[in-house]
Image (cartoon, rainbow, N blue to C red):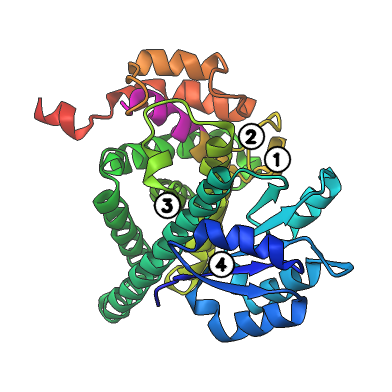
Amino acid sequence: MDRHKMLIVDDLESNRMVLAEIFRADYQILQAEDTATTLQLLEKQNKEIAAVLLDWHLSGEDGSKILEAMKRKGWMNHIPVLIVTAENSTEVEKKCIQMGASDLIRKPFDSEVVKNRVNNNISLYVHKNQMEEKVQEQNQMLRKQYAVMKLQAEKLKKSNEKMIDIVCNILEHHYPEFSENTQITREISRIIGKKVQQNYPEYKLTDKDVEAIAELSSLRDIGKLLISDHVLYKPAKLTKEEAEYMKSHTSKGCEIMKMMKDLQSPDYHKKSLEICRYHHERYDGTGYPEGLKGDEIPISAQIVSVVDAYHALISERIYKRSYSREEAYYMILGGECGIFSPKIMECFRMSRKEMEAINTDEEESA
């Protein structure tokens, strides 16, 4: 349903009129002066509302009741809420953001700035909702395909591999840069995984574990399906906000993989979540999203993290040239991509010749 309405919540009519005038040309304006009226309007028209502009102080109470109700009802998943306030307190700002508000607009404000910030938030939500719908459609397609495969498959392992191939095809279809990395990252993950298995029995990796890590390494960046193309393909350096947004591909990847839980064996599902979420963690705790240290990082993610860093260096991107494999090897050892486990680094050293012997499609056709 088309979201063509703007809900302005303020107990002063003069304030509502100022904001209404800014958006009247683009949206049908709904107004409320208290919590009860606001929730009534949302209950009836939430599917048509593009954004809520909420004054933090409403007749002696703050806007937390509205935020709590919107979060409980799930409306905030689809409607950005921008808090309008004269408060300069960081505590208020923290509270609003923690409760799910998308942004704060401080009084006094400039009408053009307000209009741009509100429209930017709406655009982000529209893109997010479209991508979620796309993922849901793709997930339904995967489920239907898997139902057919399950009848034909003789082994669960083949079903797992087929599912990974389907997802990789979706990634490659939407983002051509992924087409170059599926096979090479699998091969390098397999090589390093075998070295870990052979030299560090404390990790208790089986042949099945090594193969699963290799296969699932190609799904590490699946969360980028939910990252805006504007940020994903930006040729210049990302802003601080864009960089933080880009980092969210780790948690977004887990959200996608959770939808596919029924399509994977329990072990594959566990490893896929580990790899998606933790492949940017670093051994010294400087990585993200959780800043895990040492062997707090699952061994599957430790292996894939060094593979991801190495492959990123040898691949050409819109914002950088590709490095030679020799350059990439020494950059990894020199800590230019962060600190990895000493054990993983030893396995990386032992794997150098095998890694450099892998041919890409381009090399094979040359």
Magenta region: 306-317
Secondary structure character of the magenta stretch overall: helix
Image x and y of residue 321, in percent = 32, 19
Task: Determine which of the numbered discs, if any, sits on residue 292 in the image.
Answer: 1
Q: Mark 3 points at which residue?
A: 222
Image x and y of residue 265, in percent = 48, 68
* Disc 2 from disc 1: Cα separation: 7 Å
Image x and y of residue 312, in percent = 40, 29
Q: What residue type is labelled 3?
A: Ile
Task: Determine which of the numbered discs, if any, sits on residue 287 in the image.
Answer: 2
Residue 217 or 77: which is nearer the viewer?
A: 77
Lower sequence index among marks 2 and 3: 3
Residue 198 or 359: which is nearer the viewer?
A: 359
Q: Do the residues labelled 2 and 1 touch (CB within 8 Å)?
A: yes
Lower sequence index among marks 2 and 4: 4
Q: Which of marks 3 and 4 is in front?
A: 4
Q: Name the residue under label 4.
A: 79
Q: Residue at x 39, y 64 (%)?
A: 130
Q: Which amino acid does label 4 sit on?
A: Ile
Q: How many labels does the image show?
A: 4
Q: How crowded is mark 4: few (under 14 residues within 10 Å), some or many (20 or more)?
A: many
* Disc 3 from disc 4: Cα separation: 25 Å
The quadrant in which residue 45 appears is bottom right
Q: Which of marks 1 and 4 is in front?
A: 4
Q: Which amino acid does label 1 sit on?
A: Leu
Figure check: 92 above or below 56: above
Is label 3 in a helix, a strand or a loop?
helix
Q: How crowded is mark 2: few (under 14 residues within 10 Å), some or many (20 or more)?
A: some
* Disc 3 from disc 1: Cα separation: 21 Å
